[in-house]
Image (cartoon, rainbow, N blue to C red):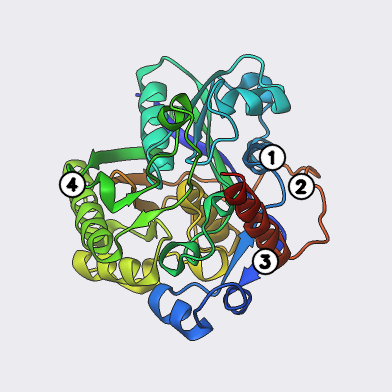
Amino acid sequence: MTYAQIIGWGSCLPPARLTNHDITTVMETSEQWITERTGIKTRRISHVKNVELAHVASVRALACANVSAKDIDVIAYATTTADEVVPNTASMLQRSMGATNAACFDLNAACTGFLYSFNMMSDMIRSGSVKTVLVVGSERLSSLMNWSRRDSAILFGDGAGAMVLQASAQESGFIQGKLGCIEDTRELLAIPDFGLDAIAQHRPLDITIDFHGKEIFKNAVTGMARACTDVLEQSGLGLEDVDLIIPHQANLRIIEALVKRLGADMDKVVVTLDHYANTSTSSIPIALCEALGQGRVKPGMTILMAAFGAGLTWGATLVKWGERITPLGSTDVDLPPTDKTGLELIQEAIAIRASAADRF
């Protein structure tokens, strides 16, 4: 039998930090209010395009796996903040990396996008249609924020994470997955009137996130818990067999509610949102990289990953880790430096939004 083994991993966090205190200088809120309701203390703000974050994370993942970009059969690029719509962003990454033999596609399932891509690519490997794939989650969500909206702007940060999956005879990698989307919940988390329809009708693009927190909370916990329960049942495993849980990093209260619903222990859970906030599609691969760097991932571990996102999409993936927990190589590739703080970067974004509003 062929397995889809994780052989490389890498992340990219832009250097500019935006603290809760910084946010209090541009909107009516407090550090305590943000921390108590979200668990977030700081987040990263990108000074470069989405694809540049993805490039660094991907090159690091390839170096970790000691795999050439030319050996990649497919680039699966999960994002909600693509730099361009046509052609896809994956083809931009293909060019920057020199992955000349790769098929390329973008996938938008909001914050669940990485798990959607991971599950699909694992199934393709196990079926024998491809051998080596790159799965990327990359977001520049700060570019979409309306910094007058306390309900949504405080939640998000920028970053990218990537994994290299490869066909293997070793029994490791993807075990079981479950994906879904809750009907009639699209309006709970959405950026309305933002896309090709508005452009075709020559309307200005008004970027505002509709965010219904209480309903999102309820559906997120229910959807992820259902997905986790299903993958455990389908794999014949119990929660006691799970060594590590990596949930989507949206809100600490959601994570705690999910863990309570499952009957798990928070000691098994990886939490990174206090440092990076909600990085959408990249939150799970970034959290996995953090766990590996901290020595929390051990050979043979069973890892449960779960996510939810706008749609409302949901998913869970069960993975058995292989033997290797350290990179085979490294790279000097990094983002270009910046001397701007996160606050300075969002102040620029606020000024651009105001200027655009004045033109219409």
Per the image, the residue denoted by label 1 is 52
Q: Amino acid at mark 1?
A: Glu
Name the mark nearer the viewer: 3 or 4.
3
> Which residue is under mark 4?
230
Q: Which label's residue is closer to the chain start, 1 or 2?
A: 1
Q: List x then y, in percent, for residue 166.
A: 51, 29
Cα–Cα span, label 1 and label 4:
36 Å
Distance, label 1 to label 2, CA atoms, is: 7 Å
Mark 3 lies on a secondary structure that is: strand
Q: Is residue 303 visible?
A: yes
Q: Which mark is residue 288?
A: none
Judged by depth in the image, the label closer to the viewer, 4 or 2, is 2
Vertical placement of residue 315 versus 24, above or below: above
Which is closer to the viewer, label 3 or label 2? Answer: 3
In the image, 246 versus 243, the foreground residue is 246
Q: Earlier in the sequence, mark 3 or mark 2?
A: 3
Q: Amino acid at mark 4?
A: Asp
The residue to which callout 2 is attached is 335
Q: Which residue is mark 3?
A: 17
Count neighbours of disc 4 (C-alpha within 10 A) and say few if under 14, some if 14 to 19, many if 20 or more: some
Q: Is residue 156 left or right of residue 185?
A: right
The x, y position of residue 277, in whole percent, is 51, 64
Q: What element does badge 2 sit on?
A: loop
Query: Disc 3 to disc 2, how far (Cα)?
Result: 15 Å
- Contact, mark 1 vs mark 2 (Cβ under 8 Å): yes
The x, y position of residue 244, in whole percent, is 39, 60
Mark 3 vs mark 1, CA separation in Å: 18 Å
The residue that appears at 69% across and 55% down in the rendered structure is: 14
Q: Amino acid at mark 2?
A: Leu
Q: Is residue 152 above or below residue 139?
A: below
Query: Which of the pair 242/149 is nearer the observer?
Result: 149
